[in-house]
Structures are given as C-alpha cells and as structure tokens.
Amino acid sequence: MPDKNDLFTIMQEPYEGLPTECIIADKVYDSCFQRECEPAVSLALPTGGPFTYLYTRFESGFIVDGTLTITPITGRPNFARVRFVFRVPFTAILRDDCACPATNVELNGSVDFSKDIAMYIPTSSDEFSFDIVIETRSQILRAEMVNGSLILAIGVFVVVKVIGKVQLLIVARGFCPAPRECEEISPDDICADFMTQPLPDFFPPQFTGEPYEEP
C-alpha cells in the first residue's frame, strides 16, 4: 500500500497543472426532501377589527431540541432510522381596517411536523460524528377567517441532510477577489446646488450719469 505522500501524489494527478488546496468542509453524505402540509393552523384574532389578511412571513425551520434519535437499521449496513420533530415559526400580518389610520397587526405562530426516515449514515470511528440538518421553504396555501380565528393552510418543502466535517482536496484559483465598493445612497443635499452658484452682486448699481428714459 502506498504511503500518505504517494496517495497525495495520486490524488493530484487528475489536476496536473492546476493548483489544489486542502480545506475543511461540511460534506453532504446523504440528502432527501419531502413535502409536508398542515391544512388548518388556527390563530385567535385579537379584539377589534374587522381584519384583512395581508401575508405571512416564515422563519427557517429547525429540529426541536430533544427529539432527534438515530438508530441503525438491521439488515441495511450504513443506513439508519432518523426520527425528529421540526418546527417552522411564522408571523401572520393582518390589517385592522377599523383603526384610523389602518394599522398592521402581527400574529405569531408555528407549525410542527414529525419525520421518520431512512438515511445513509456510514459506519465511522467514535471520534467522527455526523450532524442532521434541515432546510425549509414554506408557503401559504389558503388563508381565511372563521369565527374569530385566522385559519392557515401551510405547505412546507423540507430538505434533510447528513453532514460530516471532512478534509477535502479541491482545485483552487486562489482567494476570492476583493469585493466592489458599496454604492452608498446619499440623501438629497439641499446645499449641493448652492455651492456651485456664482457670486451675486452684493450692492445696488451706481448711477452712471446716463439720462433717464421713460419706459
């Protein structure tokens, strides 16, 4: 078996003529996505109104602390059963049409989903650990007000990833170029035009001795 230096040389061969770098990175060992839907998330309307629903602002979903469990699957080497609950917080924005002037009202809520899936998590040493991370994209499918409550139908795309921190050899083109200078937005300067005006006459004109003529 070649030693470590020989392995490094072998790894470089496909990139002959191109510079390479070793980096520490989060490698995605496995990923999958699913769709989730909650047809009736209920939020109590505040006093006042009537209200008009405007939009909903979603935050990134996250795995609820204490809910993640990973257990090997018998008969499927390097696969594990991954179970957890993830939560997507959101804020629904309403307009109070009775207020003068009309004002916006925020209703905070969240929606939870349970996951029980099989994922590729290869066998490794005790010192190497994998992380389970998620990404979410959420949207409102329907919004209606019924009997003093805002009822939201929420659809969520969730991507689940198995992440491991590893050392990778990559083709490198050096450090990223310096960014462009930010374009600053300056408020209108009321003095800008004045600073370019020519000097005006300070005193009334003198009499030149010319005869006065009737207009």
Image: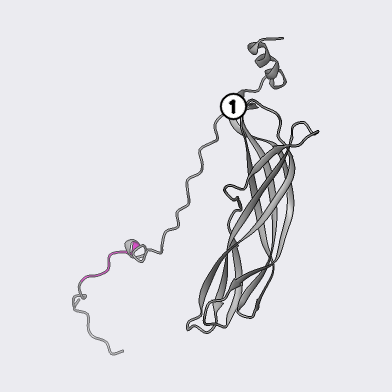
Question: Is 197 a magenta residue?
Answer: yes
Q: Is residue 185 left or right of residue 139?
A: left
Could you say which is closer to the camera, residue 39 or residue 58?
Answer: 39
- Outermost residue to the front: 74
In this view, the residue in front, 150 or 179, is: 150
Q: Which image quarter holds the C terminus?
A: bottom left
Q: Please say if 60 is above or below 140.
A: above
Q: Quadrant of residue 117?
A: top right
Query: Local crowd at mark 1 within 10 Å, few (<14), some, or many (≥20)?
Result: few
List x then y, in percent, for residue 205.
21, 75
Task: In this rendered view, identify the residue nearer to me: 137 or 82.
Answer: 82
Amino acid type shown at disc 1: Glu
Name which residue lies at 40% across and 64% down: 188
User: How many numbered markers are drawn?
Assistant: 1
Q: Could you tell me which secondary element the residue under label 1 belongs to? A: loop
Magenta residues, as a range? 196-202
Q: Quadrant of the N terminus?
A: top right
Of residue 71 and residue 148, the one placed in the foreground of this image is 71
Q: Hey, which quadrant is residue 37 in on the image?
A: bottom right
Q: Position of residue 90 (x, y in %)?
A: 58, 62
Magenta span contains residue 104: no
Query: In the current view of this chain or complex, which residue is farthest to the bottom?
Result: 214
Give the residue displayed 21% in from the left and 70% down from the top: 202
Q: Position of residue 79 (x, y in %)?
A: 75, 35
| Residue occupying the point 70% across, 15% down | 10
Residue 108 in the figure: left or right of residue 153: left
Residue underneath mark 1 = 127
Residue 72 horizontal/vertical position (percent): 72, 35
User: Magenta-highlighted stretch: main secondary structure?
Assistant: loop
Image position of 190 with respect to 144: above or below: above
